[in-house]
Amino acid sequence: MGRLIQAYFNWSGGKDSTLALYKVLQDKQFDIRYLLTTLNEEADRISMHGVRSELLTAQAESLGIPAKKVHLPASSDMQTYESVMSTAIEELKSEGISDCIFGDIFLEDLRTYREEKLREVSIAAHFPLWKQNTLELVREFIDLGFKTIVVCVDASKLDESFAGRVIDHQFLSDLPDNVDPCGENGEFHTFVFDGPIFTHPIPFQTGEKVLKTYTAKNQEEKSIEYGFWFQDLIPI
């Protein structure tokens, strides 16, 4: 057998990342050296998911793959994001890493952006879940024995009750028709705490549930407000 391709995984801590990692480990083509995750510098939590850094560390330890944490300022723009990420990727390249894995499923513009930016620094991008049926993927995830909890929901798509739920087949039945079963349009985000590639479950307890609102400008430069329900997870 030839030498494994040296790669890092663009890790969110959620179910799509986990299923993609599971499939990559099954294929045995890559040596996953790091789980690279962006965190909010001020809160020290996973970007968009709101999961505490300590739980990310616990995930990485259970998976047996080191976490590479990249901290971003809370109000960072795209220029800042790209600068910080470029520095992190150059560090990975210096260790002989040539490839990257993503858990994206069908967002074409996001894939194009990732590929173009990585091509500039000679990193090859791979998408093991690409264009697969999202309902079939999440059902496979559940049936494999993975356990994941919803940590963030878009308040315009789902109500508060979905935050803090463990994803099972009943959860899928309860989703409104306009919500993707994997939350691929950003409807919800998750934290995986157990499954076949973990050496042990991640211990935590649920904390408070908080609605956070944000203001952004749409294409017409009008300010719009949007909100997300966050379910806090407290390490034990």
Image: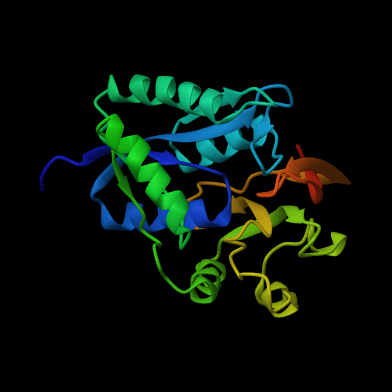
Residue 208 visible within the image: no
Q: Residue at x 81, y 57 (%)?
A: 155
Q: Residue at x 76, y 64 (%)?
A: 157
Q: Is residue 187 above or below residue 168?
A: above
Left or right position of 171 against 133: right
In front here: 202 or 69? 69
In front here: 152 or 213? 213
Left or right position of 177 against 206: left
Q: Residue furthest left?
A: 2
Q: How is the image coloured?
A: rainbow
Which image quadrant: the C terminus? top right
Residue 112 visible within the image: yes
Left or right position of 153 against 115: right
**Residue 81, horizontal then vertical, whole percent:** 53, 28
Q: Residue at x 24, y 26 (%)?
A: 96
**Residue 162, horizontal then vertical, whole percent:** 79, 63
* Number of numbered discs visible in the structure rendering: 0
In front here: 59 or 201? 59
Q: Is residue 235 above or below residue 211?
A: above
Q: Residue at x 55, y 65 (%)?
A: 145
**Residue 159, horizontal then vertical, whole percent:** 84, 64
**Residue 107, horizontal then vertical, whole percent:** 48, 58
Rendering quarter of residue 75: top right
